[in-house]
Image (cartoon, rainbow, N blue to C red):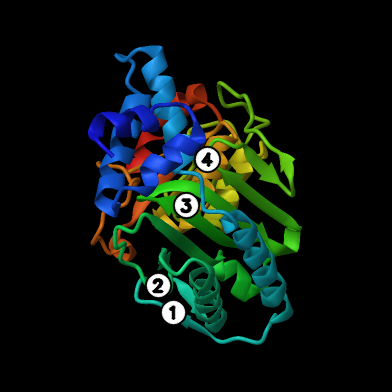
């Protein structure tokens, strides 16, 4: 296919033509075209029609493979039931960073990886418990087998299974299962966010009030009293903190010592629900970079339900976010 014909199809706003052109590319060509579509779709200097066509093509090429969402939702649900049934039947150890890990973290991670790669053998996998180096795969699963391991080990019911899917290092889909609560969140880029199949949306707050809830981690709590009038909550699970913003329970959250597997599955859920998040890394987090060991990449994260509240949070909490 000649270059002119290729771009006519990619920017045709016809899904079948976009897919046909995309299928003829190798991985590096796909990466380059995807990067162009990301840039063009957000370029205010381009004509509206050009931005729209680039955005349409981006939605098509970043649509997860058929069956991916159904598989992730099924695996998360099944893992949750299994983990609840194993209450008390596991051993606990401490990692070098002082955090806890159980034998079930490792076992669940291996089972999830095996099932995902069994159906999608050409995909990559990142997991908190192994495979921490991103290889640059077009599609890559990111797994946190037990988000909130300390809660899980203590029998505290706020913990979850997080399964995210990245396209060339950018969040495209996420599933978050919180078994004790009976909650399963999911989102696909461009298709909305859902809790147990019902659409959700972040709150519409533009300033902090004394009746708002704001979620933090224990490390943040140790820094002192936050200079906001909200009621503070510390659930002990970064995933749950972020979905609490996505579904309107909390107006924002602030966490420290965060890793990519804590947020990859939640990022599209929060985004599709109308919320937003920022992190402390100067170059950002997404897209992930090939060859980087993300087990060594730690950052702070702050989310908010609206851009207005994020501006308030950045102003009031800058010392906590960067400290």
Cα distance in 3D space between marks 2 and 1: 6 Å
Nearer the camera: disc 3 or disc 1: 3
Is 43 situated above or below 56? above
What residue did someone put label 2 on? 98
Nearer the camera: disc 4 or disc 2: 4
**Residue 115 can be seen, yes or no:** yes
Q: Is residue 70 left or right of residue 295?
A: right
What secondary structure is found at the residue carrying circle 2? loop
Q: Which residue lies furthest to the front in this view?
A: 1
> Split into 4 quadrants, where in the image is the C terminus?
top left
- Of callouts 1 and 4, the N-terminal one: 1
- Of callouts 3 and 1, the N-terminal one: 1
Cα distance in 3D space between marks 3 and 4: 15 Å
- Of callouts 4 and 2, the N-terminal one: 2
Q: Do the residues labelled 2 and 1 touch (CB within 8 Å)?
A: yes
Q: Where is residue 189 in the image (x, y as percent from the top left)?
A: 52, 40
Q: Position of residue 197 (x, y in %)?
A: 74, 46
Cα distance in 3D space between marks 4 and 2: 35 Å
**Residue 252 can be seen, yes or no:** no
What residue did someone put label 4 on? 189
Q: Position of residue 270 (x, y in %)?
A: 55, 40
Cα distance in 3D space between marks 3 and 1: 22 Å
Nearer the camera: disc 1 or disc 4: 4
- Residue 119 or 152: which is nearer the viewer? 119
Q: Kindly identify the residue that appears in the image at 59 percent across and 40 percent down.
A: 245
What residue did someone put label 1 on? 94
What secondary structure is found at the residue carrying circle 3? helix
For the image, the number of numbered tags is: 4
What residue did someone put label 3 on? 263
Q: Position of residue 110 (x, y in %)?
A: 50, 78
Nearer the camera: disc 3 or disc 2: 3
């Amino acid at each position: 296919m000649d270059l002119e014909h290729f771009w006519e199809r990619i920017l045709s706003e016809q899904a079948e033509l976009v897919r046909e052109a995309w299928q003829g590319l190798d991985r590096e060509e796909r990466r380059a075209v995807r990067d162009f579509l990301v840039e063009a779709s957000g370029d205010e200097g381009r004509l509206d029609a050009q931005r729209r066509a680039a955005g349409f093509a981006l939605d098509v090429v970043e649509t997860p493979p058929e069956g991916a969402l159904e598989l992730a939702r099924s695996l998360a649900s099944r893992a949750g039931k299994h983990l609840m049934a194993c209450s008390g039947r596991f051993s606990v150890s401490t990692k070098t960073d002082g955090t806890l890990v159980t034998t079930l973290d490792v076992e669940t991670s291996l089972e999830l990886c095996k099932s995902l790669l069994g159906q999608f053998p050409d995909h990559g996998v990142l997991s908190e418990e192994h495979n921490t180096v991103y290889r640059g795969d077009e599609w890559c699963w990111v797994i946190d087998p037990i988000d909130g391991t300390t809660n899980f080990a203590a029998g505290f019911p706020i913990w979850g299974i997080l399964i995210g899917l990245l396209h060339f290092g950018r969040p495209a889909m996420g599933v978050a299962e919180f078994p004790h609560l009976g909650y399963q969140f999911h989102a696909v880029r461009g298709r909305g966010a859902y809790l147990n199949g019902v659409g959700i949306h972040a709150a519409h707050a533009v300033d902090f009030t004394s009746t708002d809830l704001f979620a933090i981690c224990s490390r943040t709590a140790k820094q002192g009293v936050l200079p906001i009038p909200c009621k503070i909550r510390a659930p002990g699970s970064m995933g749950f903190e972020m979905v609490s913003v996505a579904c309107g329970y909390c107006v924002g959250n602030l966490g420290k010592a965060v890793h990519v597997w804590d947020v990859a599955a939640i990022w599209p859920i929060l985004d599709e629900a109308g919320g937003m998040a920022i992190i402390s890394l100067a170059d950002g987090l997404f897209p992930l970079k090939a060859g980087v060991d993300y087990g060594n990449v730690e950052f702070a994260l702050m989310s908010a339900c609206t851009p207005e509240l994020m501006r308030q949070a950045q102003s009031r909490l800058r010392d906590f976010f960067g400290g």
